[in-house]
Image (cartoon, helix red, strand yellow):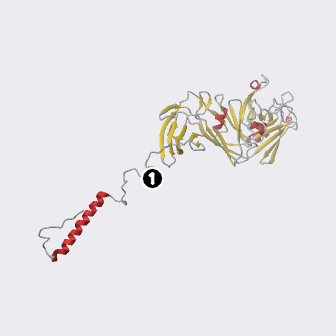
Amino acid sequence: MNVQPISGASAGAGRSGSGTGRGLLALVLGALLLLVTACGGSGSADSGKGREKAKDGGKVENAASQAVVTIAPKDGAASVATSGALKVTAEKGKLTTVTVADSKGNKVEGRLTADKTGWEPVRHLAAATKYKVHAVAEDADGRASAKDTTFTTLVPKNTFIGHYTPEDGSTVGVGMPVSINFTRGITNPEAVEKAVRVTAVPSVPIEGHWFGNDRLDFRPEKYWAAGTKVTVQLNLDGVEGRPGVYGKQSKTVRFTIGRSQVSTVDASEKTMKVVRDGKLIKTVPITAGAPSTTTYNGQMVISEKYKVTRMNGATVGFGGEYDIKDVPHAMRLSTSGTFVHGNYWASSGTFGSANVSHGCVGLRDVRGAYDDATPAAWFYNNSIIGDVVVVKNSKDKQIQPENGLNGWNMAWSEWIK
């Protein structure tokens, strides 16, 4: 740029004004240089501010991610199946985040595929529940793409639950299994069994076994250790147990194993030896089944206790042979009617010397169950649900594992099949 000399009076001011003229000229030149710099730009200035910046190789830093997230079912879907419907996939990228939770914030556990392009829940979803899905995938350049959806699972028309034993918060004997009886016959046992989790502290392997299509029992290989804490999680809500029939139960049950007590009845010797925590604490004279109505052999678990109850032979296949309305100190050992109970109608000399019962194990007692000094009262007061009573040397067969809570009579190899 050409700069013209300043004319007029200032130009003729002589040598004395030359310094002022030079200063003014410098200011003008400086202003013009700033103007040129501002208009023409500079290599050091951020000329791409507000624009897309080029990266090495000519790629654009702010370009959209190439990853595409797909969620099934679609956003807003209703009456969604509780199993097999929820899937998250990524194309042209890998999943980095998948979060699924219900309206209460309970998260759904899931599993990524090995290549991180797919995700599925590890268990069924609850029925009649709204879920929110948040998924993020990244492409090869690390650019993220996200998707959020909601859906609601189906409302079942037909449902089932499981009636379980033992009760929540109870203390039981070492032979007590976890036994669940379902209100509907189950045709999808794998799905139902997967929805029931039984754990113990101290830890021990615990396996389930089906008796028919409506009963599922769990136990360890051997009796529980005294003091064990057991937790049962029933996550049946939303499980399709049979076509069109869904579980509606979500519950956690906890119980404790008390001291160890195993009592052995020797039918030939007509005695019962009570062993607690490995030590013999009492030998009790008994009467077992008569020759025509022998007592089952095998390991039996006390499942119910009644201080006084009625026993009618007609209910267990004996016709009208007996109907005793006030049997004292009765404890059930089988579904078919085997009890260990007090007996006040036989002479005191019978116990320890003769087998005269209809298949039960009888102990000397008094009518009305008022005397705590009798052998039957002592055994009743010192027994809890889940204690084991073993019968041996009876001239009868071994009790079936499903007859009562008596799965201990099945070999472990058979139990886990």
| Residue plotted at (32% across, 58% down) | 41
Q: In the rendered view, would you say 186 is above or below 123?
A: above
Q: Position of residue 244 (x, y in %)?
A: 59, 27
Q: Kindly tell me whether residue 146 is visible in this rendering.
A: yes
Would residue 6 appear left or right of 224 to someone viewing this image?
Answer: left
Q: Nearer the viewer, residue 253 or 159?
A: 159
Image quadrant holding the C terminus, namely top right
Q: Nearer the viewer, residue 392 or 135?
A: 135
What type is the residue that disc 1 sits on?
Answer: Lys
Q: Position of residue 123 (x, y in %)?
A: 60, 38
Q: Identify the secondary structure beneath mark 1.
A: loop
Would residue 157 appear left or right of 1 to someone viewing this image?
Answer: right
Q: Position of residue 393 (x, y in %)?
A: 86, 36
Q: Nearer the viewer, residue 173 or 1?
A: 1
| Residue plotted at (48% across, 37% down) | 150
Q: Residue under circle 1?
A: 55
Q: Position of residue 241 (x, y in %)?
A: 63, 31
Extreme residue toward the front, this view: 2
Image quadrant holding the N terminus, namely bottom left
